[in-house]
Image (cartoon, rainbow, N blue to C red):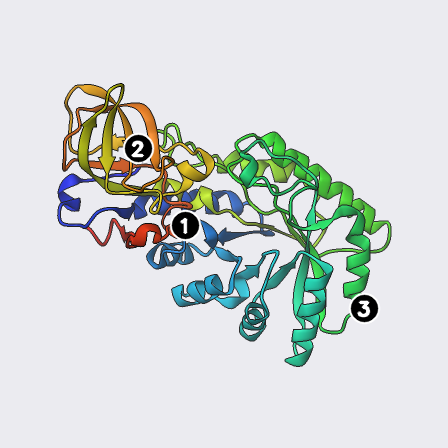
Amino acid sequence: MGIEMNVERFANVRTPFYYYDTNILRQTLDAINAETKKHDNYFVHYAVKANANLKVLQVINEAGLGIDCVSGGEIEQVLKAGFPANKIVFAGVGKSDWEIELGLDKDIFCFNVESIPELEVINEIAASKGKVATICFRINPNVGAHTHAHITTGLAENKFGIAMEDMEKVIRLAQGMKNVQFKGLHFHIGSQILQMDDFIALANRVNELQDRLEEQGIQMEIINVGGGLGVDYEDPQGNPIPNFKDYFAVYEKYLKVRPRQTVHFELGRAVVAQCGALITKVNYVKQGSVKQFAIVDAGFTDLIRPALYDAHHRIINLSSNEAEETYDVVGPICESSDTFDKGILLPKTHRGDLLALLSAGAYGEIMASSYNCRRLPDGYTSEELN
């Protein structure tokens, strides 16, 4: 079964808060390692943008994963959690100078470079420090993904990556620089992808680009295919572990890996989504003229995904087992979009009941804000609340 929650355990914890079941997290990490250990050249970097809770990071570090960062702050956080710098890849379309300097000072594994201006800046800063930066180029493969438009990243119209037609030019430019060392290519087509055909299309595009480069005598040590594997938001308790077997099997079957080449993955949501829940208390049950509202103390300041992406999170009442009634579950923010779900069945709900919004371990706590001067939610692991 999925995440385990106990009302008594939560009784003295101020709501709203995030709860992380470390048993589910470890089971997820074990499933990843069971697949990747079949390949000596497969390496997974956890995409820390999904969740940077320090205790969650420490569990992931124990499992031996590397890290994918998109900011200097993330680099600082993962180093604090104990990750070695030589397992960090640093991506992002707009790296600041201080962030590049931090990566160089810490001797991170690789910079994923997204433009010629960024390449020039990295080379310049590395020269000033007497260092050589290892780089991969993020190429925009113009491969679509069957997901929400806001989290599709691999189309030509997106801001990410270098256009395929410019690939050879930027590689030759890097090869002529003294303070960068070109090692390979990086890709990422989107997030919450459940159709394996999208990953097959990416693998085929990578094969085409490698063939094209090899015709010009350009070979690479690293192929980084990003992440994007989705999770089951409809039945998280029944399917707490994502489909890692089929995901990695796609690349085993379709990606043509060259000798001595390493393949890197950047999984985020798939690692942490199902281990987390947002726990919130019902402040009021309000009977409107046409609807019944469960008004909770969490708002989109605590979990913005439903307002931002029309995302669905399964909601359960931890306090009641009475007959079901229909509710809109809404927050206290003075915005109409502060709604978690509409017209859902819950056991008869009362003031003071605890509700759990499931599958909230990814892009939940990390995206919280203090809009309306609200305090940020705390995060606790199951080990802390035992």
Crowding at mark 1 (Cα within 10 Å: few <14, some 14-19, many 20+) = some
| Label 3 – label 2 distance at C-alpha | 55 Å
Is 344 in front, or is 76? 344
Which residue bears the numbered disc 1? Answer: 367
Residue 221 visible, this angle: no
Q: Which mark is residue 176?
A: 3
Q: Quadrant of residue 277?
A: top left
Tell me where residue 42 appears, x and y as whole percent: 58, 50
Is 146 in front, or is 373? 373
Tell me where residue 166 appears, x and y as whole percent: 79, 51
| Label 3 – label 1 distance at C-alpha | 40 Å
Which residue bears the numbered disc 2? Answer: 1
Give me the residue at 77% from left, 45% from top.
209
Return the residue found at the far right: 216
Q: Quadrant of the N terminus?
A: top left
Q: Of marks 3 and 1, which one's residue comes earlier in the chain?
A: 3
Side of 202 where 10 appears, left or right? left
In the image, residue 119 sits, relative to residue 3, either above or below, namely below
Give me the residue at 50% from left, 37% from top.
192
Asked whether the beta carbons under mark 3 and mark 1 sit within 8 Å of each other, the answer is: no
Mark 3 lies on a secondary structure that is loop
Mark 2 lies on a secondary structure that is loop
Is 199 in front, or is 333? 333
Mark 1 lies on a secondary structure that is helix
Tell me where residue 336 appears, x and y as whole percent: 36, 35
In the image, residue 222 sits, relative to residue 237, either above or below, namely below
Q: Amino acid at mark 1?
A: Met
